[in-house]
Image (cartoon, rainbow, N blue to C red):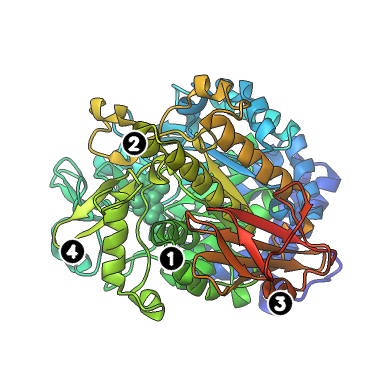
Amino acid sequence: MHNLLQMSSASRSVFEALTQRLAPALAARCAPRDVDLFLIRLERYFEDLYLPLVQLYGEAADWHHQFEALFAQMVDAYAARPEPLRLLDLERQCTPDWFGQPNMVGYVCYSDLFAGTLTGVRERVSYLQELGVTYLHLMPVLKARPGASDGGYAVMDYRAVNPALGNMADLQALASELHKSGISLCIDLVINHTAKEHEWAQGAIAGEEKYLNYYYTFPDRTLPDAYEHTLPEVFPDFAPGNFSWYPAIAESGRWVWTTFNEFQWDLNYTNPTVFREMLDIMFFLANQGVDILRLDAVPFIWKRMGTNCQNEPEVYLLIQAFRGLMRVVAPAVIFKAEAITPPKYLLPYLGVKNTVGKECELAYNNQLMVLLWSTLATRKVTLMTHVLHDMPRVLLGSTWITYIRNHDDIGWAITDEDAAAVGENGFLHRQFLIDFYNNTFPGSFAKGALFQYNPVTRDARISGTTASLAGLEAAVAKQDDYEIDLAVRRILLLHSIIMVYGGIPLIYMGDELGLFNDRSYLSDSTNAEDNRWMHRPPMDWTKAKSRHDSTNIVGRIYKGLLNLLAARKYEPALHYLGLIQPMWTDNDHVFALLRRNPKGRLLLLANFHESEQSVTADLLQYSDLGGNVRNLLAEGSLLTLADGRIHLAPYESMWLAGDK
Ligand code: OTU
């Protein structure tokens, strides 16, 4: 070691002692060069992983034992890491911005709904390549409990694939096929809870002390009641409360912490053994060839009395520790935070101030998603421009997942303060959105449904596919060509924005073909009460066949998307590391966003109105695009002005670049 890295002397002495103890085990199992690489990385990330561990578990009675056990696990996982993945580790450490390149395009699907099985997905890789996909998120693939499993988010075995989809060998084969095709693989790591059928939960049910400590269980209502004072309910309709009673546990029965459904048991991360178990699972999945771990429901992994038990400071420490450890063993793998939470809590998942580069590389930009739908309904861009102004302009070492829809509902996360800042009443605005997307507001084009409606607060979230919410389903039912045209334009408008904003844009399976709400879930008793299934339709391969015929609706959507993707692919201004700057225009219907970095500038204009709109051409000067301004979405044709203004067709978006 050359002691290149500054470390406190306390950390360094722990590090040195540790490396001495690890050296023989490493040398026995790895080639000398691999031992060196391990130690170089361990030194580089030592404080990143060690300091949070000390804060989290330094007081535990068995801390020294835990610490030793943890490093033994690291050596095991490192020694088992397959050679091609070791190379990928090096490649990605040399190209740390690999996930933030302009060519990154994500696709998300349920394997069974897309292609039956994992092998089926492998056979469809060419379909993904046609879209230019470089990142594939397969919805839960690990072995879930039988019957209702919250779409697979109740895992009973993290080391096995859901048998209906295939086996671990199929997952490995898929991962390596994807890698050959330039596609990275993201899967869900359900980190907050296991299924009650998991062997740990079964141990707890049998009354084993060790496994009772893996979960939060209570003999009576005293503590659950005290916690409930400040706990919200995630699924008040079908899973009210946050605790479930199990008479069979430990003979006398226990209340178990179940934030989500009764069959999803929250894990107890105050127990360092639970931390190590989950770490082992991360190592295992990394060694199968998974590239991105989506940390499901991660805000909930630490509880504190008197709070809503989300986004507690320890959650961020846990991520830091996991990430530091992963970066030594499997640095090719990155984390994605599934934290649908306000910006104040969300940003620390990506790293701010002294945690930059130490948290997740990716996080969902829920705010942008909600604002897109809000703006589509109001046709006014003021709220979106205002809120996005308060989002960070630049992120370092981490970036957004931008999306229009996913498999969950849309919750109207617009604060009273933000609404008031643009002269709206927050409550009334959210009520308007609920009515609009539930199709009860007069003149609404959207066909969605209420999710978790609360008659007391009148709050509700919304379910529905992109196409149905954007008006295509209603327009097709009316056979109204004008409305159909507008709906297609809306779908493309939203995609245009997520492709420019910054980060990895995610296409939800079927949106590229404009799939509608699917009501077949109603006849399946395991899913019938959860209407999120209406926006999880199976892939329509018959429709997909007509995707190249741009005289039909499917073809128009598909061609429009390909046009956006082609324009995005080599556009240096869209590299993640650059300025994200929303701009006020002189037209409330037109959104403007400038992307800028040393390699390029791009100005997005987006008309949210169904009539033609214009904005002042001064925007071009403010954006400092240079001369010869072209619209990359119109085959790079030169922009023409009329009366000193830029004119946009109904729902048109433009990507403007000049010679700067
Ligand atoms: C996630 O969502 C998944 O996306 C859902 O499909 C699961 O049902 C759930 O976890 C349980 O595993 O509350 O309404 O801030 O918003 O974790 C969906 C994060 C959810 C939560 C999110 C959760």
Answer left or right for 579 relative to 349.
Answer: right
Q: CA distance from mark 1 to mark 4?
A: 46 Å
Q: Residues within 10 Å of mark 4 (few under 14, many from 20)?
A: few
Q: CA distance from mark 1 to mark 3?
A: 61 Å
| Residue 87 left/right relative to 409 | right
Q: Which residue is mark 4?
A: 457
What x and y, as percent, mark residue 578? Answer: 71, 67
Q: Give the quarter of the figure containing the N terminus.
A: bottom right
The amino acid beneath tag 2 is Met
Task: Report which residue position mark 1 lands on.
Answer: 61
Q: Tell which of 243 and 59 is nearer to you.
A: 243
Q: CA separation, marks 4 and 2?
A: 24 Å
Amino acid found under the numbered disc labelled 1: Ala
Q: Earlier in the sequence, mark 1 or mark 2?
A: 1
Q: Position of residue 174 (x, y in %)?
A: 63, 28
Q: Is residue 585 above or below residue 298?
A: below
First in sequence: mark 4 or mark 2? Answer: 4
Question: Does dot 1 land on a helix, a strand or a loop?
Answer: loop
Amino acid type of the residue tagged 3 in the rendering:
Tyr
Callout in the foreground (3, 4): 3
Q: Residue 484 is drawn in which quadrant?
A: top left
237 versus 129 height, above or below: below
For disc 3, the marked residue is 622
Query: Label 2 belongs to which residue?
Result: 534
How far across and how far down the image is residue 122, in percent? 62, 24
In the shown orientation, is residue 564 left or right of residue 161?
right
Disc 3, SS: helix
Q: Residues within 10 Å of mark 1 (few under 14, many from 20)?
A: few
